Amino acid sequence: MTAASVSAVHVEEAGSAGPLLLCLHGIGSSSAAFAPQLAELSAYARVVAWDAPGYAKSADPEGPLDLDGFADAAAGVIRSYGSRAHVLGVSWGGVIALRLAARHPDLVESLIVADSSPGSGTDPSKAKGMRARATELAEVGPRAFAEQRGPRLVSGEAPAELVERVIETMASSVRLPGYGYAAESMASADLRDELPAIAAPALVLCGDKDQVTGIEASQVIAGGLHKTAYVIVKDAGHLANQEQPERFNAWVLSHLRITARIPE
């Protein structure tokens, strides 16, 4: 594991007051995935969305990063703001968020884990498939890779413009070696045994039409945590925060009103 420099991590930020909300994107995405949260939740919180090390506008890490390395990089971002954070993680970002809460409990005020899982290491076939992704990316390139994978991240009823935005975000965000490090961090992860030790209150969400990680994986997370609320987001696929942003943001704001005491 090599530590990632905070100065090399690009973030998009909106809002100047209220609690810090750090947003961690999925394995095929970037800070662009959180445009609806940056736009709407910034009225209530200081919303910060990162490009993970080796993604989009962030520099490539100096060496391989494992899951702890990505979690430590996120911890460095939080420390740079001088406060604890509410951490919102989507898919792979949710896995990072959970490890961050286990590894740096002093930095995590609460968790919002969306369309995520305990990691691909829970199943040998899933781990094998995850590890194969880096080779696929190297063989076909970012654009074809995104065109193959992007459409299944949303439901069949998602508007065409959202599908194209998801594809474009992926195509402009993923590259090697960062994506390879991310895929290996997922393939090696099985967080089921460490979930009960996480003390931060959590909101776990999942789109009802998520065909990627799916409802069952989110239920494993919710069941393993002690302080949790579990929500199904109607009419949403794997990217519930983008496909149903109004519903998603309403649940996140409700969670923040409780955990951060944001006034009505």
Image (tube, helix red, strand yellow):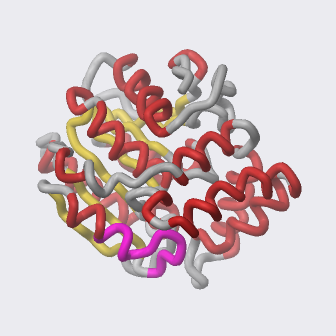
In this rendering, is residue 104 above or below 87?
A: above
| Residue 43, quarter of picture | top left
The answer to whether residue 254 of the structure is visible from this angle is yes
Image position of 228 (left or right of 173): left
The quadrant in which the N terminus is found is top right
Q: Which residue is located at x 42 percent, y 60 percent? A: 116
Residue 262 is at least partly visible in this image: no
- Residue at horizontal 76%, vertical 68%? 148
Horizontal side, residue 30 vs residue 149: left or right: left
The percent coordinates of residue 134 (x first, y second) are 73, 51
Span colored in magenta = 209-219
**In x, y percent, where is residue 202?**
22, 53
Q: Nearer the viewer, residue 189 or 88?
A: 189
In terms of depth relative to the viewer, which is nearer, 216 or 143? 216
Residue under the image location 18 percent in, 63 percent down = 229
Q: Position of residue 198 (x, y in %)?
A: 20, 45
Foreground of the two, 62 or 172: 62
Q: Residue 125: x percent and y percent?
A: 57, 69
Q: Is residue 228 left or right of residue 60?
A: left
- Residue 214 drawn in magenta: yes
With respect to residue 32, does 164 lie above or below? Answer: below
Q: Please give the name of the residue rendered at 41% of the width and 50% of the height, measured from the top-left corner.
A: 95
Q: How many marks?
A: 0
